Image (cartoon, helix red, strand yellow):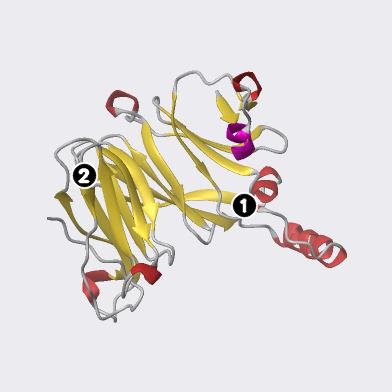
Amino acid sequence: KVVRMEASMFKKIHPEKRRGHKLIDGFDTPVSCVACHSSDPALFATGTTSGVFKLWNLKIRKAVHVHTFDGSNSSGGITAAAFHPDGKSMVLGVGNGRLVFLNFQKKDKTQNQQKNEEKEDSDNPRTPPLSEALEAGQIEVVIDREMGELSQPISRIVFSPCGNYIATSDLGRHVALFRWYHRDERKNKPIEWIYIGRHRAHTKAIASISFLPPTWGSSPSSSSSSSSSLLYPSLKEEEPSDSPSYSVD
């Protein structure tokens, strides 16, 4: 079951009025993670312990995309999810430390379908939100890449504000960092997600992980916290200038 709760509920003094609104119900297995789209409030993602990933249009409370990841049921299913800040892609934590990168792209159309869509676009220049485009079958969800450098179930996935870095935490108390950059750090090679490294940053389970805004220092940084400590890592790079920093004491 997925429930929406307004922040204003917690300002009221009557606990009986602090009731959320049920959005989605009837999952076959427990929901293990959720994520909200960065710009389309109607688009919502859920993952379950049995490996079922769904994208929902909350306006009509209908699943607009469903995918089951084989082999993930015995290893924790879908453990984490996050949308890219630009809203054009997302990443999932699946099974024992697998990162799955998903892209939202226009479906290939026949020539007649393309002409009909161009006519509709000229009549109605409004660009539909991603939730509506998925419902209409105009956009498809494509698995772009899978990365298996991590060996423990991923508990959290966070994008940096610029979208060029990903930080993850896992059940083994590691914090890992990924960078959107040229392969092998050579500018003549294609740009892709690169695994930078990981460190066992805490002695207890990691409760949260976040990127700090650039105004707190010379460049954005990532921080993680457990029940007993808060880590503020720092590492400077020359390029790009908005890169996060990362080190653990």
Horizontal relation, residue 49 to residue 149: left or right:
right
**Secondary structure state at the residue bearing disc 2:** loop
- For the stretch drawn in magenta, what is the main secondary structure? helix
What amino acid is found at the position of numbered circle 1 in the picture? Ile
Residue farthest to the right, as pictured: 123
Tell me the residue at 71%/46% (across/down). 136
Q: Does residue 147 appear in this view?
A: no
Q: Is residue 169 magenta?
A: no
Vertical placement of 99 versus 87: above or below? above
- Residue 15 badge: none
Of residues 47 and 188, the one nearer the viewer is: 47
Tell me the residue at 58%/28% (across/down). 3
> Magenta stretch?
6-11
Vertical placement of 45 versus 115: above or below? above
Q: Position of residue 137 (x, y in %)?
A: 67, 47
Vertical placement of 215 versus 203: above or below? below
Q: Are marks 2 and 1 in contact (CB under 8 Å)?
A: no
**Secondary structure state at the residue bearing disc 1:** strand
Q: Which residue is mark 2?
A: 229
Q: Which residue is mark 1?
A: 139
What amino acid is found at the position of numbered circle 2 in the picture? Ser
In the picture, the quarter occupied by the C terminus is bottom left
Q: Quadrant of residue 51?
A: top left
Tell me how far mark 2 sits from mark 1, CA to CA.
43 Å
**Badge 1 density bin: few <14, some 14–19, many ≥20, Cα 10 Å:** some
Q: Position of residue 199 (x, y in %)?
A: 15, 51
Q: Earlier in the sequence, mark 2 or mark 1?
A: 1
Q: Position of residue 90 (x, y in %)?
A: 46, 51
Tell me the residue at 78%/65% (across/down). 118
